[in-house]
Structures are given as structure tokens and as C-alpha cells.
Image (tube, grey):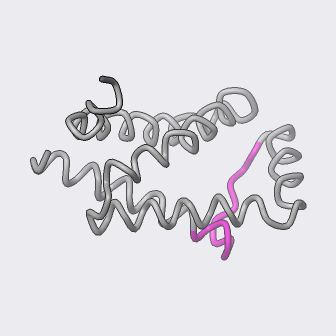
Amino acid sequence: MNSTFTKLTRFLLGLILVFFGLNKFFDFITPTLAHEAKVFIQSLGETGYLMQIVGVFEIFIGLMLLFKKWVPFALMMLVPISINILLFHLFLDMPGVGGALVVSIINIILIYKYWSSYKMLFV
């Protein structure tokens, strides 16, 4: 659980989440999206709250991973977000699926590394 690989992947995932969470507030990168994806994201943004909530969760989870606080809990909170990121790119923006795969795969690897924390859920 405390191997160098685990620490690096946890830190990398935390940085990715904080970066993209902050981007939802400050918009310092604007990705090139397919038309359907752009319309979908704009409609979510027009709700006035949804993208900000996702951004807050991404920042919160990312900080928990960076500071190694409640890591198993943070990884479980990230599961629905990473699934939605992956499905968004698979169905609406296939060129961006690489980053989504990175987040999902790192999440899966870290859940595997912290599996001893989840065993009691499946007894």
C-alpha cells in the first residue's frame, strides 16, 4: 500500500483531479470538443451549479489523495465520476478518451492496492 508506485499513482491522480477541478472554475484550458460533446457540456454549465459541484468534488478528492487522507474513501467517491468521464468520452468525444482511460485505470489500480480496506464491504 505504501510502495513508491502507489505513492506516485496516488499523487498523479490527485494532481489531475485538482487541475481539472480548478479548471471548472477558472477555465484556463478550453478543450476542443466534438459538437455533441460541446452542446452537452454547455447544457450542464447552463444549470448554474452542476459543473461547479463536480469541480468541488474533483478538488476535494484530489486533495484527499495528495495529502493521503481517507484515500479508500476518496477512491470510492471517484468511481462514479471516473465512470462518467469515461462514458462521456466514449459516447460524445472519442478523441479525448485517452485521458479518461488514464483516470479510470489509475482509479482501478489504486482500488486494487487498497483492497484490504474494502474487504469488509463484501463479507
Please state, as top left, top right, bottom left or bottom right, where the N terminus lies in the image.
top left
Residue 80 position (above or below residue 26) = above
Q: How many marks?
A: 0
Q: Residue furthest left?
A: 3
Q: Nearer the viewer, residue 9 or 117?
A: 117
Asked where in the image residue 68 lies, by quadrant, the reply is: bottom left
The residue drawn where x is 67% and y is 73% is 25
The residue drawn where x is 34% and y is 60% is 65
The residue drawn where x is 19% and y is 54% is 7
Percent coordinates x, y for residue 52 in the rendering:
70, 66
Q: Is residue 19 left or right of residue 87?
A: left
Asked where in the image residue 21 lies, by quadrant, the reply is: bottom right
Residue 19 position (above or below residue 80) = below
Q: Is residue 17 left or right of residue 95?
A: left
Q: Residue furthest top?
A: 123
The residue drawn where x is 51% and y is 66% is 59
Q: Is residue 78 left or right of residue 27?
A: left
Percent coordinates x, y for residue 116 in the rendering:
20, 36
Percent coordinates x, y for residue 91 in the rendering:
72, 27
Q: Residue furthest front?
A: 123
Please state, as top left, top right, bottom left or bottom right, where the C terminus lies in the image.
top left
Residue 34 position (above or below residue 59) = above
Percent coordinates x, y for residue 109 in the rendering:
30, 35
Q: Nearer the viewer, residue 57 or 24?
A: 57
Residue range of the region highlighted in magenta in the rendering: 22-33
Q: Is residue 32 left or right of residue 102?
A: right
Q: Is residue 31 magenta?
A: yes
